[in-house]
Image (cartoon, helix red, strand yellow):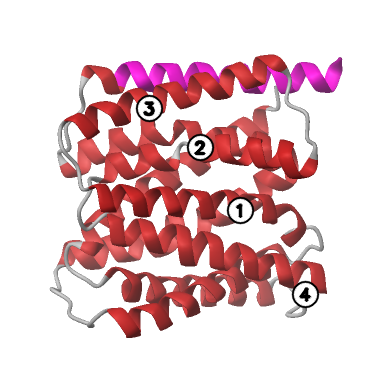
Amino acid sequence: MDIKALAMGLLFVAMWSSAFTSARIIVADAPPMLALALRFYISGAMAVAIAAWLGQSFRLNSVQLRSTLVFGLCQNGLYLGLFFVAMQTIEASLAAIIASTMPLIVAFASWLFFKERLPKLGVIGLVAGFAGAATIMGTRLNAGVDLFGVALCIAGVTALAVATLSVKSASSGGNLLMVVGYQMWAGGTALLVAGLLLETWQVNWSWTLVAAFAYTTIVPGLLATWIWFLLVGRIGATRAATYHFLTPFFGVSIAALVLGEDLKIWDVVGVATIAAGIFAVQVSRGHAKTG
């Protein structure tokens, strides 16, 4: 097993999952799309400035540019935009659980469009991971939930799968931090247009809102995205996507600690099943490489 990739994956998921909690705080007091657009402009400017300081080129090749635009629009514009809107009415933990189903979509799309083979144990692992996520989600649905918010999250996680498959070509030509900055600006521009058309800039200012916004901008926004690009470049989109199965564990745990959201026994059972699924996928991929 690649220990460095494992550490990168766990760090990424911890950062990424914490964004559901900070987003829940933000959307309670600010318009979701406009707030997210502002975050992306700030994060993007930071990434571009650091990239320029490191000597990275402002120019991308045509393949990089196209993939960067797709990634920015799908992940930042659609995925995060839809999730931010949805979290006005659904809990952060439920949003995290829905996001964790992304590896199934990526694996299926990789098989259907790119003929990528996944060993049998890996398939079993993916199914187990989905079953674990479904177990957790089922208890939340039985307790009553806003179905429109759930539908927005499902559409968003599908867009995230498309973004994941585009990462490899976006980062293939180097200039990694410049790519990160550009894809944030692409998503931010789409969200700005949508927000100006659909929202009103009305903010209830508080120190918790400012802290949540600053945290979301720097940690999940900039650092997590950079680690994600590095991880996909190291182990590929399908294997990297399996780490999203840990999103429920971190997402539910952080939401319970920070926001006081309920953590039930079926959450624990689901998380254990998800972890077993990830282990099976990772082991099967390792055997496929050495076999």
Residue at point 15%, 39% (across, down):
260
Indicate which disc, 2 or 4, sits on the residue closer to the N terminus.
Answer: 4
Q: Quadrant of residue 36?
A: bottom left
Can you give x and y, in whole percent of width and height, for residue 133 in the image?
A: 40, 28
Indicate which disc, 1 or 4, sits on the residue closer to the N terminus.
Answer: 4
Q: Is residue 291 positioned above or below 86 on the image?
A: above
Q: Which residue is mark 4?
A: 60
Mark 1 is on which residue type? Val
Give residue 134's mark: 3
Residue 289 falls inside the magenta stretch: yes
Q: Residues within 10 Å of mark 4 (few under 14, many from 20)?
A: some
Q: CA distance from mark 3 to mark 2?
A: 14 Å
**Mark 3 touching mark 1, by CB under 8 A?**
no
Q: Residues within 10 Å of mark 1 (few under 14, many from 20)?
A: some
Indicate which disc, 1 or 2, sits on the residue closer to the N terminus.
Answer: 1
**Mark 1 touching mark 4, by CB under 8 A?**
no
Q: Which residue is mark 1?
A: 162
Residue at point 40%, 17% (across, down):
272
Closer to us: 9 or 151: 151
